[in-house]
Amino acid sequence: MIAILACTLFLARPGNAQPSAKQQLHVLTLLGRPLQFVIADQQGLFAKYGLEVSNNNKKNSDELRADLAAGNGDLAYLAVDNAVAMVELAHQDVVIVMGGEGSQNELIVQPAIKSFAELRGKTVIVDAPNTAYALQLIKILSLNGLTAGKDYELKAYGATPMRLVAMRENKDFAGSMLGPPTSLVAKQEGFGSLGSVQDLIGPYQAAGLFSERAWAKEHRDVLIAFIAACIEAQRWLMNPANKAQVIGLLTSHYHLSPEIAAKDYDITMNQPGGFTKDAAFDLNGFKNVLKLRAEVEGQWGGHPPSPDKYYDPEYFNAALAKVK
């Protein structure tokens, strides 16, 4: 009995306690591992909150939305108009829980094209034809007198880097909405720009975090911990003291040239439409997302609903309080 008691006391000592298992989270993404996730890993922020986070990169948003609906991922980090599409088109009860990035997309065109009029009769490529950046493109072209299906062809192709590759290989693909760093690479290679979302449309809530609403409720504590880690990662990312490290990370992890990495940093950290403070959700930018969907897709009779239908700030606010 004494031996058993001694063994029990020894095993109960703090130094001999077994570490608790980390909570596994699986996030669906479109453009590889997001920079915030890389930083959260490297700075030990996911581990700090007891998380182990993996991500599965999909080739297009249609595939990503289908996987989330099928339960093949816990969360999605993607342009949040995809969450709206899941609710309205696929009738999935999803909820947006965090922001992160605005839109700095530009309408990138083949070098020979110098005006919107020269896109008439051409083919432009998008990720999916009825969400997010495709709607940006359709709106921008309509503002310049061009109608999809009548004046130009809209072709679904895939995620941003894939579209630049396609435009290099096929000159018949006249243009596409591309954001940094891909847009920076394109312009360095001689492709042209007919303008940016910020100038032509205005503020736009782009990438953010969303999940099935039932999953969010059932995993509230884990979700809040994950958002807290993302907030801390975003703070580290945007801290000017870490500029050199971030540029080095862009160079090594995303295989950018030092010149492009430095430009990407300056644009995404310091100019409208880039990373947001504390990964906050841009409510005005999201209202513009809904307005664009109402105008382009004709949903809701042209009158967008309240953002509250899709965005629940409760999780983010709890995470922000946890960080503070």
Image (cartoon, grey):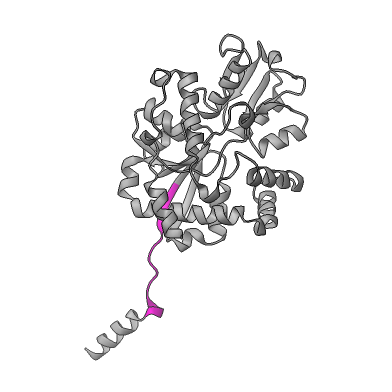
Along the line of sight, which residue is nearer the eye, 1 or 96? 96
Horizontal side, residue 25 vs residue 127: left or right: left
Check if residue 17 falls in the magenta segment: yes
Q: Is residue 197 above or below residue 319?
A: above
Residue reaching furthest to the bottom:
2
Q: Determine if residue 72 is in view.
A: no
Q: Which image quadrant: the N terminus?
A: bottom left
Horizontal side, residue 316 vs residue 117: left or right: left
Residue reaching furthest to the front:
284
Count of numbered badges drawn on the protein? 0
Q: Is residue 207 above or below residue 262?
A: above
Residue name at image x 40 percent, y 69 percent? 19
Answer with the quarter of the image where residue 49 lies.
bottom left
Along the line of sight, which residue is nearer the eye, 93 or 242? 242
Q: Residue 146, percent across and down?
A: 61, 13
Check if residue 281 falls in the magenta segment: no
Q: Residue 83, percent across and down?
A: 43, 34
Residue reaching furthest to the left:
1
Q: Is residue 172 above or below residue 276?
A: above
Q: Which residues are magenta?
A: 14-26
Answer with the quarter of the image where residue 20 lies.
bottom left
Residue name at image x 27 percent, y 89 percent? 3
Q: Residue 246, percent across and down?
A: 66, 53
Q: Determine if residue 286 is in view.
A: yes
Residue name at image x 55 percent, y 28 percent? 133
Q: Residue 309, percent across and down?
A: 36, 34
Along the line of sight, which residue is nearer the eye, 317 or 13? 317
Residue name at image x 72 percent, y 33 percent? 186
